[in-house]
Image (cartoon, helix red, strand yellow):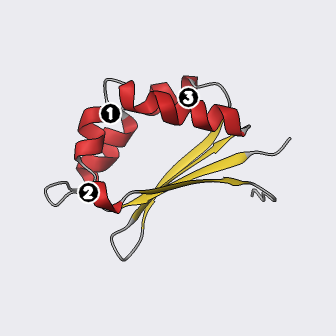
Amino acid sequence: MTHVAEIVTFTLANSTTAEEFVKLSQASEAFVRAAPGFAHRQLSQGEDGRWTDYVVWTDMKSAQDAAAQFPQQDFAPALMAAIHPDSVQMRHENVLWNMTA
């Protein structure tokens, strides 16, 4: 079975701090954990200020279904308001190799 990585990169809206954004992201945890096919998630910020939300799903259908349902969740308006809308880039990729500690 091929896993699918959902990779979303973005910058924050000018008024949002990193600490605020992490808390807003944590509000989505229950939804993501409960979504069928969820395997792994991490959130990171680069030195250039861009953020990456990296979610691994067991299959493409699960990834696409969660992406479609995400905007309708109670936490979504506040989370999306914290992101600069023109900066969002989202893609799905097949995971071809995985290495863990």
* Outermost residue, bottom side: 48
Residue 6 location (% of width, % of height)? 58, 49
Q: Which residue is mark 1?
A: 76
Q: Which residue is mark 3?
A: 33
Using a 10 Å C-alpha cutoff, classify the residue at mark 2 as few (fewer than 14 neighbours), some (14 to 19) or many (20 or more). Answer: some
Q: Residue at x 49, y 32 (%)?
A: 68
Q: Are marks 2 and 1 in contact (CB under 8 Å)?
A: no
Q: Quadrant of the C terminus?
A: bottom right
**Label 3 residue SS:** helix
The residues bearing labels 3 and 2 have C-alpha atoms spaced at a distance of 25 Å
The answer to whether residue 12 is left or right of residue 15 is: right
Up-down relation of residue 88 to residue 24 (above or below): below
Position of 30 relative to 101 (above/below): above
> Residues under labels 2 and 1: Cα distance?
14 Å
> Which kind of residue does numbered mark 2 sit on?
His
Label 2 element class: loop
Earlier in the chain: of badge 3 and badge 1, it is 3
Dividing the picture into quadrants, the one containing residue 73 is top left
Mark 3 or 2, nearer chain start: 3
Q: Which mark is residue 84?
A: 2
First in residue order: circle 2 vs circle 1:
1
Q: Is residue 48 left or right of residue 62?
A: left
Q: CA distance from mark 3 to mark 1?
A: 15 Å
Q: Residues within 10 Å of mark 1 (few under 14, many from 20)?
A: some
Residue projecting furthest to the right: 1
